[in-house]
Image: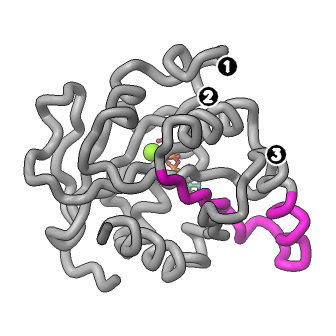
Amino acid sequence: MKVNKAEFIISAVRPDQYPEDALPEIALAGRSNVGKSSLINRMISRKNLARTSSTPGKTQHLNYYRINDDLYFVDVPGYGYAKVSKTLRAVWGKMIEDYLLSRGPLKLVIQVIDLRHPPSKDDILMYDWLKANGLPVCVVATKADKIPKSRWQKHIKIVRQDLLMRGDDPFIMFSAEEGIGKDELWEVISRYAGE
Ligand code: GTP
Ligand code: MG
């Protein structure tokens, strides 16, 4: 997809602030500091529209970015920063759980994982929870630039196995740094946003 326009719309703290134009929404979920905001910036070829930081916990609200009047990226606060807990609600907050469970225009959750490490307990909990609730998920393994290409397959296998991914969920290698996977991810997004 060619991005002609990308604008920050709102940092929502309450559901009544969510946009009402019913454009498809693509949410970014993932551990704090994994690279969700950087992924958005790479997808829209902007350096810092989505605020990034080397300090975990930068994104605190649901941040809406409208792309071309076609769809929204919704940057969601990272989980696993405060504390590892048993329930998603405790890890991540009720507002986010409610958003994911009941937001009509939500078409796809991009779950971002760090390719360098095996999925964390929270990554596994999150993926299970998304699947159990019937949400469409695309797993994106980012920071691929940090791993030599010769070792990609080994890392991909670990991520897929630990998450118990089924064959039909999209899985994409990505690097916000180098742009790896950008076109492939746009294809997946367009497919889900169009439905
Ligand atoms: P929170 O908003 O705190 O949940 O973090 P986030 O998931 O939005 O992470 P963010 O995009 O702010 O990136 C965190 C750090 O990882 C920054 O220092 C980025 O520069 C770095 N980073 C993100 N993506 C990549 C990547 O693909 N490759 C490399 N090498 N570094 C990356
Ligand atoms: Mg962020």
Q: Which of marks 1 and 3 is in front?
A: 3
194 vs 95: above or below = below
Q: How far apart are marks 1 and 3 (CA)?
A: 18 Å
Q: Position of residue 46 (x, y in %)?
A: 35, 70
Q: Quadrant of the N terminus?
A: bottom left
Q: Is mark 2 on a helix, strand or loop?
A: loop
**Mark 2 vs 3, N-terminal side:** 2
Question: Which residue was labeled with disc 1?
Answer: 84
107 vs 153: above or below = above
Residue type marked 3: Asp
Was residue 139 drawn as part of the magenta stretch in this picture? yes
Q: In this view, does 2 lie to the left or right of 8?
A: right
Residue type marked 2: Gly
Residue type marked 1: Val
Counting other residues with Cα less than 10 Å from the Cα at mark 2, is it few (<14), some (14-19), or many (20 or more)? many
Q: In which quarter of the image is residue 49?
A: bottom left
Question: Which residue was labeled with disc 3?
Answer: 162
Write down the region rendered in magenta.
Answer: 136-157
Q: Which residue is drawn at 83% across and 78% down?
A: 149
Residue 67 or residue 105, whichever sits in front: 105
- Residue 162 in view in this figure: yes
Was residue 120 drawn as part of the magenta stretch in this picture? no
Q: Position of residue 107 (x, y in %)?
A: 35, 55
